[in-house]
Amino acid sequence: MILAIPLAACTAPAPTELPLIRGYRAPADQCQLVGENAFTNQYLDHTADLVACPVGYEGTGVFVTETGAVFLETLTGYDLFSVPTNQG
């Protein structure tokens, strides 16, 4: 007899809220630096910042161009980006 065992997903469950810390480029910036929690830690590393911009934010194109941000996914009303830090 062969038993089928479903495999659990390997990613952490999505949080209901992202741990937003502060405006990324300025205090009033709609794009926010994201802190660490059980979900976001899969995206954090020492060479990039994790940043969340509101879905539909009209300045997203400028943000991506100015920072070199790479889109990761959309979560709880925010687009998540990995933004390389200067490691020079």
Image: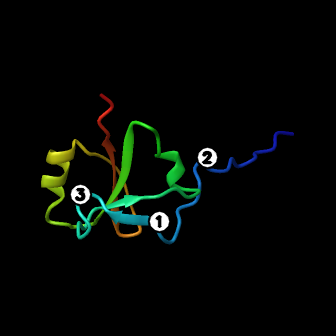
Position of residue 31 measured from the top left corner of the image (x, y, whole percent) = 27, 62
Alpha carbon separation for disc pair 1 and 3: 17 Å
**Numbered disc in front, either 2 or 3:** 3
Q: Residue 86 at x, y = what percent?
A: 29, 35
Q: Which amino acid, by three-letter code, is at mark 3?
A: Arg
Does label 1 or label 3 sit earlier along the sequence?
1
Q: Nearer the viewer, residue 82 or 75?
A: 82
Query: Disc number at residue 19?
Result: 1
The amino acid at mark 2 is Cys
SS assignment at label 2: loop
Measured as percent of width and height from the top left, residue 46 is found at: 45, 38
Task: Name the residue tied to disc 3.
Answer: 25
User: Is 70 in front, or is 88?
Assistant: 88
Q: Are marks 2 and 3 in contact (CB under 8 Å)?
A: no
What secondary structure is marked by label 3? loop
The residue carrying mark 2 is 10
Q: Disc 2 to disc 3, how far (Cα)?
A: 33 Å
Q: Are marks 1 and 3 in contact (CB under 8 Å)?
A: no
In the image, residue 56 sits, relative to residue 25, either above or below, namely below
Marks 1 and 2, how far apart in space? 21 Å
* Precedes in sequence: disc 1 or disc 2: 2
Q: Which quadrant of the rendered structure holds the N terminus? A: top right
The residue located at (59%, 56%) in the rendering is: 38
Q: Nearer the viewer, mark 1 or mark 3?
A: 3
Residue 29's x, y, as percent? 23, 66
